Image (cartoon, rainbow, N blue to C red):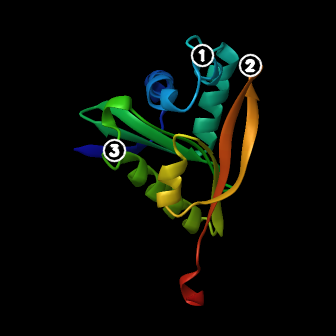
Amino acid sequence: MLDFTNYHDDDLEEILQLFYETVHSVNAQDYSQAQLEAWAPLAMQPVSVAAWQQSLRNNKTYIARAHYQIVGFGDMTMEGYLDRLYVHKDFQGQGIASALVDLLEADAKKLGLTHISTDASLTARPFFERKGYQIMQTQTVERQGISLTNVSMVKRFIDEKDG
């Protein structure tokens, strides 16, 4: 059974491990080993860890657990930018990412936002398309001197009053 909770600082170590393992297994189909290492280095710098902790605290962050193990997480800024969405490599295809996105989109609507945006990996692009996100542009970002391609996407909310 899945349980969804808000982020707490004691979740950080497990989240970072999930992030590393997910990127290096799930995203390996679309990115080279050098790109994976630049995106999710084995040893994250203390500055990076502190930045993750601060943003997870400041953002609306949900944790998905199965039997006390973190199996996914997602976070969104208060301005509606879906920053991170990762599901454990052994729990792919079970609706966890959809449930996390649904929670974040509900929060965006409660905040009165008209849309939510994200920069999706090539791997995540089909998922976001199925969730109603539209491609704005394909872009290249640089991590540790290595270029990675991702896709800027947006989902606009239709006001129920407007039809």
Task: List x then y, in percent, for residue 17.
Answer: 46, 21
Label 1 secondary element:
loop
Give me the residue at 65% from left, 20% from top: 38
Q: Residues under labels 1 and 2: Cα distance? A: 10 Å
Q: In the drawing, does residue 123 fall left or right of residue 65? A: right
Q: Residues under labels 2 and 3: Cα distance? A: 31 Å
Image marks 1 and 2: residues in contact by CB distance under 8 Å: yes
Label 2 secondary element:
loop
The mark closer to the camera, 3 or 1, is 3
Other residues around mark 3 within 10 Å, as few (<14) / some (14–19) / many (≥20): few
Image quadrant where residue 50 sits: top right
Label 3 secondary element:
loop
Type of amino acid under label 3: Gly
In the foreground, 103 or 118:
118
Q: In the drawing, does residue 103 fall left or right of residue 137? A: left
Q: Residues under labels 3 and 1: Cα distance? A: 25 Å
Question: How many numbered dots are placed on residues in this image?
Answer: 3
**Tag 3 residue:** 93
Type of amino acid under label 1: Pro
**Tag 2 residue:** 144
Q: Please report whichever mark, 1 or 2, sits nearer to the chain's N-terminal start.
A: 1
Task: List x then y, in percent, for residue 109.
Answer: 56, 67
Query: Residue 108, relative to residue 152: is it above or below?
Result: below
Task: List x then y, in percent, for residue 60.
Answer: 56, 48
**Tag 1 residue:** 41
Q: Is residue 92 visible?
A: yes
Give me the residue at 46% from left, 26% from top: 10
